[in-house]
Amino acid sequence: MTLQPGTRRPNPIADDGDEYTFCSTCAFAPVCLAEGLAKHELWDLHCLVEHIGPFHAGEHVFREGDPFTAIAAVRAGTVKTYVVDSHGREQVLGFFLPGEVIGLNGIHSAKYPCNAVALDTVTLCRFSFPAISTLATRLPGLQAQLFRLLSHDISKAALLAGDFTADERMAAFLLALSRRYAARGFSATRFTLSMARTDIANYLRLAAETVSRVLKRFQTDGLIAVERREVELKDVPRLQELAQAVLRE
Amino acid sequence: MNHAIAFDPELLRRYDKPGPRYTSYPTAPQFSDAFGEAELREQARLSNGEPIPRPLSLYVHVPFCESPCFYCGCNRVITRDKARGEAYLLRLYREIEMVAPLFDRDREVLQLHLGGGTPNFLSPDQLAEMVDVIGRHFRLGRGPGRDISIEIDPRHVGPADVHALARTGFNRVSLGVQDFDPAVQEAVNRIQSVEETLAVIEAARAAGMRSVNVDLIYGLPKQNPEGFARTLDTVIAAAPDRLAVYSYAHLPQMFRAQRQIKDADLCDPATKLSLLQLAIDKLGAAGYRYIGMDHFARPGDELAIALEDGSLQRNFMGYTTHAACDLVGLGVSAISHVGDSFSQNHRDLSVYEATLDQGRLPLWRGVGLDQDDVLRAALIQQLMCTGGIDAEALEERFEIEFEQYFAGELAQVEALRAEGLVEGDARHLRATPRGRLLLRVIAMCFDRYLNAGAAAPARYSKAI
């Protein structure tokens, strides 16, 4: 007998869509439904949607400089985007969870300006960009959703630019993950960190040792519980207090 | 929590059947050479990637012994040639240089244990050098909780050596005694006086070592209750902090040295059980707590405290308070537990050395754990360390329906319940005081590989 996947399992697999239903994590389903278009009516959209993967941990979805042809929504797993600077140092740009869209930053230059790599087993929904742009001109809701995704992508990058303490950064990171999971119907208080601590450290501009030291202190102080890669948020109000400055609430 | 044990010879006799000791799950017969260097490197990488990477626990195997004890089933090499120790250390240092970089440098070593063989086959200076080399490649913890321990053969060490070990940082010693009865000592080829043994214990205390452990064995040839009672009295008077009382496993087809033991000298099953009972009664009366399996500790000892507060763990080195570590085994035949894997070095010394000379990790075999393995390992760990199974904790952590997932296993447990080994409903199973000595029999119900008939039972020693 195998283990049943559950809602708190590492990188929950989205309920798979078919001809008639959207995947449960689909980035575009709410818009289309709001437009009164059920999936079977979306033959236009359907023909430009392509399920791709699985990509295994360490496999690249696209690389910097590849021609930009499509954006992709994560159906399952976690994708990391990063660039490598002129000294050969990696810089993590972000992590993309189920329901989130990668490749948006390729629009302006017609090339992907970063690398995207699977951190665990990843499946994607690929949207041909020319086709979805054309469709968006006909569906105002879809266009608005594309703009929302774009602006969200830009503001996310600004999140950590300020002069914040390690504790503030870490609390904000955990809370942001919690909210993003919750928005897709997963547990807000218990999730798996599929990114390595060096990735977290790189993303938060901290040393790997600092990441562990801060998490250990959070654990001692009863804010969180960590077991291997699983994290449980035990005191959300206190985490919010810490994250306030970063999340600007 | 009730940790009482009840001795029921009739029951023990009935369950005296071969079974694993569950120092790992899956057990060694599941290890294969499909698990190699690439797999170990990947497990180490993943373990470094955990948000709070586990601290490390190092085990170093020193395989040499000057003479063969006939009962021994350990991986060892009999020699008096000290040059072999020197040659071995060079390979060991090569291995340390190759293995240490697999682990992020900020992962502290909380425990370093030297086992054998006879670690004190190496001189105190060699051992100091070894600890120094380890300290240059790993981050040895400096906190008060750090353990550096060594198994000592009291026949080959003097008080001055013990003081030298303490200066190196060793703070726990474990002494092999087995039995002081001269007839037994002769039959097992290990002549060791009470005086030299007590002198080492005294020296360890005088040198400020934190803890002294003594190993005894019951079921040895020529052993009898009178002689073993005297041994127990002598040992109890020396007041070691911990005691292990192991069952002698007579497997002459597997362990060549055991072929020196005459069948006629072996004690019969009833006598063997009475020796165990004697140990349990005497140690209990002297105030020792039963920790589990073969282990006893004084009430103030960390193991006894860990038993009380539920933090007790079990690994290849027995019961420990450090099992939330990744275990890195160094040296010939050493076993590692890194991430969700077990792996073992070559057990043939010449192969171990040749592999290192070729610049490769001396890995022999191993196994990567799947989710089911991790779940069953956690369950067996609970059972071995608390004497019970906490269904709710397992359901919470692994997202299973306990009764549904283990329906077949729980049906097997019912047979043990009928025998009075377990009590409580299916969600709160506990070993009864009668069942405490047969924890591995209960654990066997949950071993997927045993139930699949994958392991040949003859390869395991008997339960008691």
Image: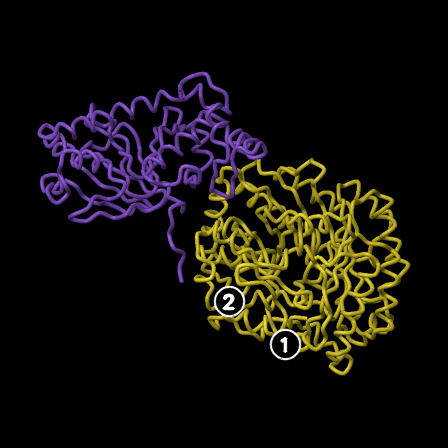
Chain colours: A purple, B yellow
The structure residue drawn at horizontal position 59% and vertical position 74%, both measured from the top left corner, is B418
Reply above or below: B240 against B12.
above
Q: Nearer the viewer, mark 1 or mark 2?
A: 2
Label 2: state its secondary structure: helix
Which numbered disc covers residue B253?
1
Taking the view exactly as shown, the residue that stands out farthest to the bottom is B264
Q: Position of residue A98 (x, y in %)?
A: 31, 39
Amino acid beneath label 2 = Leu
Please report the residue visible at 65 percent of the width from the left and 70 percent of the height from the top.
B463
Chain of the residue under label 2 = B
The relative height of residue B405 versus residue A206 in the rendered view (above or below) is: below
Identify the element where label 1 is drawn.
loop
- Residue B206 falls in which quadrant of the image? top right
Residue that extends furthest to the right in the rendered view of this protein = B195
Same chain for the residues under marks 1 and 2 in the image: yes
Distance between the Cα atoms at labels 1 and 2?
35 Å
* Residue A72 located left or right of residue A139: right
Tell me: A23 left or right of B144: left
Q: Against B128, is B28 above or below?
A: below
In the rendered structure, the answer to whether residue B356 lies left or right of residue B261 reads left
Q: Which residue is mark 2?
A: B410
Numbered disc total: 2
Q: What amino acid type is highlighted by mark number 1?
A: Gln
Q: Chain of mark 1?
A: B
Q: Residue at x 86, y 70 (%)?
A: B181
Quadrant housing the C terminus of chain A: top left
For the question of whether residue B152 can be seen, the reply is no
Q: Residues within 10 Å of mark 2 (few under 14, many from 20)?
A: some
- Decide which of B431, A91 is in the foreground and name it: B431
